[in-house]
Image: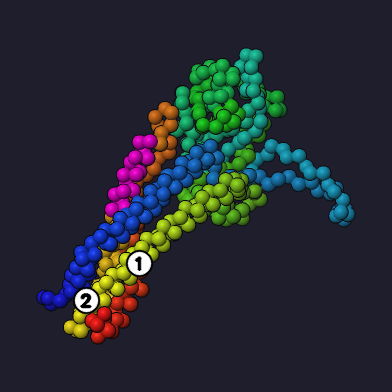
Amino acid sequence: MNPFRFFETIVAFRFMREGLTQTLLIVFGVALGGGVIIFMSALLAGLQANIIRRTLNFQAPIQVLAPDQVARPLRAGTDATINLQPRSQQLRSVDQWQKILAAIDARPDVTGATPVLTGPGFAQRGEAAKSVSITGIEPPSYFRVIALPEKIVAGQSDVGPIDVIIGTELAKDLGTAVGDKLSLKAASGAVTTLTVSGIFDFGNKGVNERNVYVSLRTAQSLLDLPGGATSIDVRVHDPFAAEVTAQALRGIGDVRVDSWISTNAQFFSAMSAQILANTLIRVFVGLTVALGIASVLVVSVVQKSKEIGILRAMGTSRRQVLRVFLIQGAFMGLVGALAGSGLAWAFLVLWRGIAKNADGTPLFVVAIEPSLFAIACAGATLVGTLAAVVPARRASRLDPAVAIRG
């Protein structure tokens, strides 16, 4: 075994031991910076997941709808400058929705697709009456797109031909509970009496007092649209790629396709701005850490110039001197990142204990992902190595005679 195999490592650790105070300060700085980056990354990921989950719990990422009805001139050749009054939009089904549904289900980026029939109506019980949005669903496929079962607070989520699921606000307004009867009346005048099989709470007052869920066949009969579906709701693997999938689906037929990104443009812009701000903060923290490591190593080169000159005079190559300082930078980055990972873990555990709702449930779930710590350690090691490049090159270029004379 070559006795000089670990020469650069031995010299690097000796230099760090002799400048122990500087080494500990920069390791602490790296730990603090790495801990902040990990903590902010985990916090932002948890916040985004919570927002997306709450937003998409009662909204499909993609909706395939019938195209808007457009007013057309009665005669060909009519002057194009004539203003035509916009045509009112009638309740109508997506043309050949079964065929379109099969094509959507076959896509690899789609995790679920379901037919939905939605129309206006009134919910009545005794003297109380409320305007509602009647939603006809096929429970097995609908629950793969919308997390309705998770929001049931009373009763069950399944709906049969004579069942209806309503929100907590509507149940309070109508004075009804699970097992009670209520009447649904469509705009066409059709009326049916159904049994409340479940009550949901989406955490949104408007949804809780407006939406009612019935079986698809019940809605088709009530809204006078036999065999129809006003939309196909689609869930995708990546919610942030919903617009890309929506653009691809626009070519499957005469349909209009909306994604949650286009219908919530302001919300998506705010989230993108939040991600950008977080990224910039992490970049600047990383630059600060890199400058700290570089400054310490520059000082070390000045302080150890005589030792470096002696090493060079004894036959140490420029590459070996270069590696001495690169090892120092990588080591301080790695050790600082490991300490920062422990610090971030402690912060995250503390956050879980503090950030709670009034009922004791977590404000939002912050996952402690091992991969995040691994990436942070690898990144800090790389940053430390790159920060050491300039001081290392300066040390390797020292003239032995000049360095020894001081």
Residue 214 among magenta residues: no
Q: Nearer the viewer, residue 19 or 71?
A: 19
Span shown in magenta: 339-354
Left or right of 379, for residue 104: right
The residue type indicated by label 2 comes to Glu
Is residue 141 visible to us here?
no
Q: Nearer the viewer, residue 118 or 25?
A: 25
| Mark 2 burial class by Cα count in 10 Å: few <14, some 14-19, many 20+ | some
Q: Dot 1: what SS?
A: helix
Q: Earlier in the sequence, mark 1 or mark 2?
A: 1
Q: Badge 2 is on which residue?
A: 307
Residue lying at the far front of the rendered structure: 406
Left or right of 195, for residue 324: left
In percent of the image, x 20 and y 80: which residue is there? 310
Question: What main secondary structure does the magenta stretch of the protein show?
Answer: helix
In percent of the image, x 29 and y 65: which residue is there? 330
In percent of the image, x 33 and y 48: which residue is there? 344
The residue type indicated by label 1 comes to Ser
In percent of the image, x 13 and y 77: which residue is there? 2
Q: Badge 1 is on which residue?
A: 295
Is residue 353 visible to us here?
yes
| Mark 1 burial class by Cα count in 10 Å: few <14, some 14-19, many 20+ | some
Q: Dot 2: what SS?
A: helix
Residue 82, above or below 144:
below
Provide residue 58's location: percent of width, then percent of height: 53, 37
Left or right of 112, for residue 117: right
Provide residue 200's location: percent of width, then percent of height: 50, 28
Looking at the picture, the colour scheme in use is rainbow
Residue 215, above or below 291:
above
Which of the labelled discs sits on residue 372, or is there none?
Answer: none
Provide residue 11's location: percent of width, then percent of height: 20, 71
